[in-house]
Amino acid sequence: MAHKDFRGFLAAIESSGDLVTINDEVDWDQELSGIGRLGCERNGPAFLFTNIKDYGSRIRVAANPIATWRRVAVALNLPADTPLRRLYQVYAEREDKAIPPILVNDGACKDVIIPGDKVDLFDLPVPMVHEGDGGRYLGTWDLVVSKDAKSDWVNWGMYRFMVHNERLLTGYPRPTSHLGKMLLEGYVPQGRPMPIAIVIGADLPSHIAAAATFRMSGNEADLAGGLGERPVELIKCETSDLYVPASAEMVIEAEIYPDRVAQEGPYGEYPGYRSGEMGNAICARVTAITHRRDPILTLDTTGFMDSSATTTSISGAIAIKRRLERHDVPVVEVYVPPEGGVHLAVVSVRRGGAEVAQKVVEVLTARRALMSKIIIVDEDVDVFNMAAVIHAFATKCHPDRGTHITRYEGRANALTPAYSLEERIARSGATVAFDATWPPQWPAETTPIRATLDSMYAPDVQRRVLQRWKTLGL
Amino acid sequence: MATEYETFVRDRSRILSGREVVLTLRDLSPGRKKYRGVNVRAVVSRPPQSGEPVLWIRSVVGLKDSKPCSVRIIEELPEAFAAEPYSDFFDVMEKAERR
């Protein structure tokens, strides 16, 4: 079973050598997050900052909980050196074994209760994540709970939230996100404020579930239970009927206005850029804050190779595989490399060709289109081996016939740096599939043969070479 | 009132027109409340006018202008503007100017 709370996870990554605690004073204004950013860029450890300028030691900040595969493994209660393919397998297996949450009356997240009229968000050491951001971001590694106005569907998502003033937050759950759809279809037409709870520092499976690519109307609390192999304990909010993980470090209860906006962004986002997607956001007024004693805020130093990159790599790949299977694409494996900023997927298929490539790109852009590049390879290419993928892409993808482009309006990823400002505002974009498979109509006798040990050598030679390799101690 | 602010703009010419404009300013005073947002009706000047708070303009990707401005705040506005979620915030501010 996974660790029951965030502190248990921190203890585990400290034991595995994946956490560094910094007790010297660090400035919340860029310095703290700068350390975290470098950690992401150098595949470094997570950080726990215990002494923050202007704030002292009362509230700590933990940065980059699962920005490496080692820490993802620990979060799932696996050995830190678990191979990536195995991580994907475990995630997929546990995703299929949902465990519903249980409701409790007491929880550590209620140790301290601050009513709305006493809230001052500037009492929290919220980091200025990047120089030039629109403000200080409280929600970077969070879990935002919302409920559909017309049904029992409760959504958990990971969405960014910025401090505007003492009680006002602005945020950017995309309008195409589950929360965005709930708000626009259920609350705005009725002029009703939408209650939300921004949960910080819950158990890791809960955050992974919130960040996961998961089906519409799916219950992420059940998914979190499955991923952690234990039910998540939920407790009711103080100012709404929403339920939140009881062990969380902090819960910020708020209401999204159905009829007001304030400035949000820009923000250096997960694709690794600040793309200028500001100015199309939501705003929420805080109604209460509850937290543990000596709480720990969390930070994902958003950008290249952040914590959301690993999470969405796994869940996004599994979601893509399941969707392609539902549409009868002969998919074998899918990998979303975290270096691609959730813009690139690698799909291996039993049988490739133009028809399959076209189908893949159409299926994966039907509702919302987050991936802008898909590389399709034959099943003899290991999708987790990017050297092999690049080799296949560079050599087998026909520069003309091998590219399959689909364009769309209104559902493109506004964070995609390649789009012009006008395209980002209009959410107008395109996705290309690179077909790096052999055309199925090519006869075997003229199809090129790969010059690798496993393809161009007799089986007994391969066996002898591998044996010799071993005896040489290589 | 702070002595230094920043603001994010899509269209510099609107801000630097010399007429009253609606802006969101971020207070750059050091300390816990740094980056606090405030909506204002104000006049922006470049070069900066003496006695007025300094204003730094940033683009929609956060790029900071090399030359500062100054800002004369005429009135503080409510913390949020009337508009549906996801409305274009720059359009909303322009509409607020016309009221």
Image: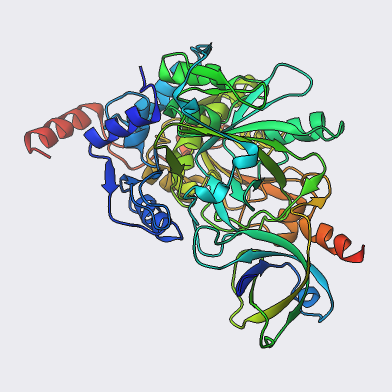
Q: Residue A250 location, x and y as percent?
A: 49, 34
Whether residue A212 can be seen here: no
Against A439, residue A20 (above or below) is: below
| Vertical arrangement, residue A431 with respect to residue A457, above or below | below
Relative placement, left or right, of A291 versus A134 is left
Q: Nearer the viewer, residue B33 or B81?
A: B33
Q: How many marks on residues?
A: 0
Taking the spot 72% from the left edge, 36% from the top edge, the residue there is A180
* Horizontal arrangement in the rendering, residue A148 relative to residue A462 (left or right): right
Q: Can residue B40 be seen?
A: yes
Q: Quadrant of residue A386?
A: top left
Q: Position of residue A20 (x, y in %)?
A: 27, 45
Residue A377, compared with residue A171, is above or below; it is above
Q: Residue at x 75, y 60 (%)?
A: A422
The x and y percentages for residue A326 are 63, 20
- Residue A299 sits in which quadrant? top left
Image point 59% across, 73% down: which residue? Answer: B64
Relative to A228, is A16 on the left or the right? Answer: left
Q: Is A352 drawn above or below residue A215 in the view shown?
A: below
In this image, B11 relative to A345: left or right?
Answer: right
- Tell me which colouring the rendered structure shows: rainbow
Q: Residue furthest right?
A: B99
* Residue A440 position in % (x across, y down): 56, 32
**Which image quarter: residue A295?**
top left
Where, quadrant-wise, is the C terminus of chain A in this rendering? top left
Q: Quadrant of the N terminus of chain A?
A: top left
